[in-house]
Amino acid sequence: MLLISLMGSGSVLAESLERTLRLGCVQWPPYISDELPGNGFLAELSDLIVTASNQHLDVVIMPWKRVVKGVDTGDLDGSLCMFKTEERKSRMHYVEPPLLIEQTVVFHRKGFTPEIEKLADLNNYYLGILDGSGYQKDEFIQKHPKLTVVNSFENMFKMLAKGRVDLILAEYRNGMAVIAETPSLDFEQFSVFPYSYQHTDVHIVISHNAFNSEELTNTLNKVAGDVIKSASAKALYERHGILELPELKPLSSE
């Protein structure tokens, strides 16, 4: 009876780890979009990792606040596009290594050059950020006196083009993709300030409330590094035309 019980327990664990993972993300071109082949670069790269761990991947595209809530509650097993922050580590396991490095930059209208030499100088301008973004909880952002929180990247760039905000924080590659794919926007309307707000890792995360979350994370950790270095991953990078990041200095806090 004990042997049968142990065999049964092993079977339950195997079934729990060989399952379909529901990983969420917002529409985030060129990384995630239901209009891109395979749902975008991060979806395809995550699928390689999940498949290598004998799982199946279900990509769930939804508003960002619902993604974060779904990860927190366990309604989603996790996310495939989460920035690493200290605050989030208490609620989710990060699969290592990161899928890629992204750079959050300051976009402004061409013909309007902000006078910014340090981080505090951003306080002099009306600033737009995406609702639910990792840096929304930064102490600096929370104290910003002229902050506008917007529900989508596309709306944020439209507000910038119309002068409703002076500056926006957005990830460089994502911002370029939004401009390219939005008919009412044009590259000639925007410039990138030569200083970056932050560099951030983009990870797959597993909710603490997902079933067998630690074992699941360990399983993904065992294969992620080799998959990210593989020829298949490099081919995805080239096929999706992921831009190289510009060489920008970080904004000084002093």
Image: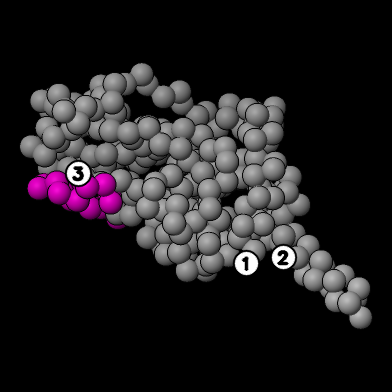
Residue 110 vs 43, above or below: the answer is above
Marks 1 and 3, Cα distance to the nearest angstrom? Answer: 36 Å
Image vertical order of residue 172 relative to residue 94, above or below? above
Residue 74 at x, y = what percent?
52, 67
Q: CA distance from mark 2 to mark 1?
A: 7 Å
Q: Residue at x 48, y 61 (%)?
A: 71
Q: What whole-number distance in Å separates the C-alpha atoms at marks 3 and 2?
A: 42 Å
Q: Which residue is mark 3?
A: 140
Q: Residue furthest top?
A: 247
Q: Give SS at disc 3.
A: helix
- Tell me, for residue 16, which label it has, or none: 2
Image marks 1 and 3: residues in contact by CB distance under 8 Å: no
Instruction: Please state if 28 lies on the left or on the right of 212 as rendered.
Output: left
101 or 89: nearer the viewer: 89
Residue 114 point in image, percent of width and height? 12, 28
Q: In the figure, is residue 116 to the left or right of 222?
A: left
- Amino acid type assigned to the residue bearing label 3 in the image: Phe
Kindly check if marks 2 and 1 are in contact, taking CB atoms under 8 A apart as contact.
yes
From the top left corner, tell me how far across and down residue 1 is, in percent: 91, 81
- Residue named by callout 1: 211
The magenta stretch spans which residues? 136-152
Q: Earlier in the sequence, mark 2 or mark 1?
A: 2
Residue 3: percent from left, percent from top: 91, 73
Residue type beneath disc 1:
Phe
Closer to the chain start, of discs 3 and 2, is 2
- Examine the structure image and report whether residue 76 is included in the region drawn in magenta: no
Q: Nearer the viewer, residue 110 or 134?
A: 134
